[in-house]
Image: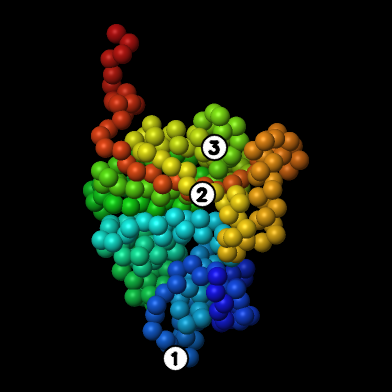
Amino acid sequence: MRTAVVITIELGEHLYTNESHTEVSLAPTALPPQGPAAQSALIERLKKHRFYHCIDLGNGVRTAGIPRLIPQQQLTLRQLRRFDFAGKRVLDIGCRDGLFSFEAERLGAAEVIGIDNCISPGAVEVLIPHLKSKVRMYEMNLLDMTPDTFGRFDIIICSGVLYHIRYPFQFVRVIRDLLTDDGTLLLETALWRVWESQPLLYCPASAESPYESSSVTFFNSRGLIASLESLGFEARFTDNLFGSRIFRTPGTTARSWAGAGVNAVQRIFPRLVSRVIGQFFVDRGVFVCRRRPGTPAEFAYWDGKHNVHN
Ligand SMILES: C[S@@+](CC[C@H](N)C(=O)[O-])C[C@H]1O[C@@H](n2cnc3c(N)ncnc32)[C@H](O)[C@@H]1O
């Protein structure tokens, strides 16, 4: 953690503050110092947009984003910073304002493409030019992508997206097809961490979602690993949000710590927690998944015609 003074802009719930502020720096940039006029011009351009990510733009300015999401974004960043990006082609799925795309670029990626089915105009019009970034962003649904769209990628980042997807297996299958043979997927998603002795998927109707209505896919970690493995990955659960590390994660509040308590109780008494809070408690997890060489035998059965009944 480091301390920074952040310049003020008010923009609905997305605030820039001028308080001395414990900066949970997300993508520290090494931009040259800017004069006050250039800084004011940048702030004016930022004011025209809403941001989701809190991105450090240097010189004490950052996008306001939604600060309560910082701890879960830290999960992805922590893992990302362990990767060797040098010379790699990277795809960031559901890139929003580009926090992870810019970080991959900063860590040495040769090429970064971000896709989102609702592109962030603020990222395209302000952040990319300001950061002099070569990240390319496209408004696109992952399910429409094939290796012919932009080629294959060495590293794919998919953070905060899978639980929004109604066709999760197809989604993972598309990701697999977009990876190089020895490519790696960094997958962060919401988790339902109960009954881990069984591989489970909770797939509520929108109205029953424990998040908001577009969140409809909650694996438990065993279920997600089993699914990833059967779709041709070697998957490792590396970190979760509401575990003991929460006490050392920047941006956490007393509410997050209470969440860690509820999460721990839920793992032992899932029914008790859902009765008390009216739904299950959602954790987040990060998985590092290496594409296994070859094609899983099941694909022949799932994808084609077969002759097993005759
Ligand atoms: C919760 S935000 C997560 C943003 C960012 N990846 C993060 O972790 O901070 C999910 C993003 O995924 C995008 N998204 C959802 N489904 C998608 C799809 N099928 N293809 C591409 N983007 C998608 C949404 O538009 C949204 O911007």
Q: Is residue 197 above or below residue 155?
A: above
Q: Nearer the viewer, residue 246 or 205?
A: 246
Q: Is residue 289 above or below residue 38?
A: above
What residue lies at 50% left-to-right and 79% top-to-bottom?
A: 61
Image quarter (top left, top right, bottom left or bottom right) of the C terminus:
top left
Which callout, 2 or 3, points to the residue nearer the camera?
A: 2
Picture coordinates of residue 281, whole percent (x, y): 65, 44
Picture coordinates of residue 160, whole percent (x, y): 49, 52
What residue lies at 32% left-to-right and 59% top-to-bottom?
A: 85
Q: Secondary structure at mark 2?
A: strand
Q: Secondary structure at mark 3?
A: loop
Q: Amino acid at mark 3?
A: Asn
Q: Quadrant of residue 11?
A: bottom right
Q: Nearer the viewer, residue 275 or 193?
A: 193
Image quarter (top left, top right, bottom left or bottom right) of the N terminus:
bottom right
Ligand 1 closer than 8 Å to label 2 CB: no
Q: Is residue 136 above or below residue 10?
A: above
Q: CA separation, marks 2 and 3?
A: 14 Å
Q: Is residue 170 shown to the viewer in this render?
A: no
What residue lies at 44% left-to-right and 91% top-to-bottom?
A: 35
Left or right side of 250 for 46: left
Q: Seen from this angle, which residue lies furthest top?
A: 310
Q: Secondary structure at mark 1?
A: loop
Q: CA separation, marks 2 and 1?
A: 41 Å
Neighbour tally class for label 2: few under 14, some 14-19, many 20 plus, Cα within 10 Å: some
Q: Is residue 5 shown to the viewer in this render?
A: yes
Residue 291 marker: none
Residue position for label 2: 239
Residue 35 marker: 1
Q: Amino acid at mark 1?
A: Gly
